Amino acid sequence: MEKTVIEVEQVANVLKLLGDKTRLTMVGLLESSECCVCEFVEVFQMSQPSISQHLRKLRDAGLVREKRKGQWIFYSINQQHIAYPLIQDLLKHMPDQNEKLEALEAEGLRISCD
Amino acid sequence: MEKTVIEVEQVANVLKLLGDKTRLTMVGLLESSECCVCEFVEVFQMSQPSISQHLRKLRDAGLVREKRKGQWIFYSINQQHIAYPLIQDLLKHMPDQNEKLEALEAEGLRISCD
DNA sequence: TCATTATATAGGCATTTACTTATATATTCA
DNA sequence: TGAATATATAAGTAAATGCCTATATAATGA
């Protein structure tokens, strides 16, 4: 395991952010691939503003990055974040979120710009 | 690493609980030794009811256990909790909280019943 | 240029959170 | 038994949270 030691307060702030089912799942999804906002809207069946607000919190904390590709904005995990190794460790204790993306793919709702 | 896989919602609930500096530090302290409420009051310089309420949340979630010893009630970490391995992994990314207990000891404020 | 699609922001609202002070309960010991 | 100590609970409150609807901004393509 890569070991980064982070101050308690910083750890608490990251955990507070991830202490929400939606954001935690988002991070789990982003660990396997980039996603755009509309994909999250599909996955979570939640209003688009709500999704945007969750992503904003993650972005403000530096945990995710955004990149525009045409009309879409893709979010990805920031592997440079000091808490990234910690987050990886966390995710190891959770079920893989990939099936949610595969379900999207099966419905033809996956966005791809490559 | 011991690997327990837990449902996303359960993980989120644990992270929400630990997404508070006080509770996260409490768990860090309890990982190295049992503590009673008055010790926490000293360490955190916080009102006794406030400490009790934090401990109650941890106890309600089953993360810690309480055991009366005379007039004191000692709290300990519940190593049987399904999320305990996850918590251990978390703590590896934080500085050791022991010095806080050592400081107490130096002031003669550490309670011991053995 | 205009309609459509994708995303962000603003404002409102109900719920939760973390503290406070006051009080209740439990144990110890003279 | 009664005072002192340790802890829990109750009630109140300000701030934070997470959602919603409405609207603004940005890119696309006919």
Image: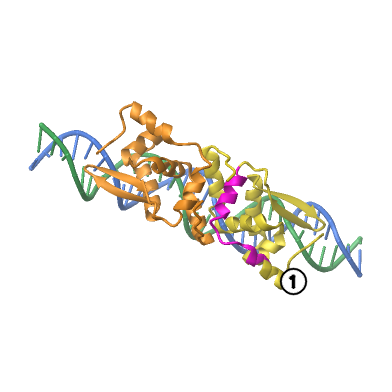
Chain colours: A yellow, B orange, C green, D blue
Could one spot residue B19 in this view of the protein? no
**Amino acid, disc 1:** Gly
Asked whether, in this view, residue B41 is left or right of residue B71, the answer is: right
Percent x, y for residue B60? 38, 55
Between B56 and A103, the one lying in front of the other is: A103
Q: Chain of mark 1?
A: A
Residue at image position (68%, 68%) is A102
Q: Which residues are magenta?
A: A83-101
Q: Is the residue B89 above or below the residue D27 in the image?
A: above
The question of residue A39 being in magenta is answered with no
Residue D3 sits in quarter? top left
Q: Residue furthest top?
A: B106
Q: Is the residue D16 above or below the residue B111 in the image?
A: below
Q: Secondary structure at mark 1?
A: loop
Percent x, y for residue C5? 78, 65
Residue at image position (48%, 56%) is B13
Could one spot residue B8 in this view of the protein? yes
Quarter holding the C terminus of chain A?
A: bottom right
- In the picture of the structure, the residue carrying the numbered disc 1 is A108
The question of residue A89 being in magenta is answered with yes
Asked whether, in this view, residue A37 is left or right of residue B29, the answer is: right
Residue at image position (64%, 47%) is A63
Percent x, y for residue C25? 22, 50
Chief secondary structure of the magenta span? Answer: helix
Percent x, y for residue B37? 32, 41
Between A39 and A47, the one lying in front of the other is: A39
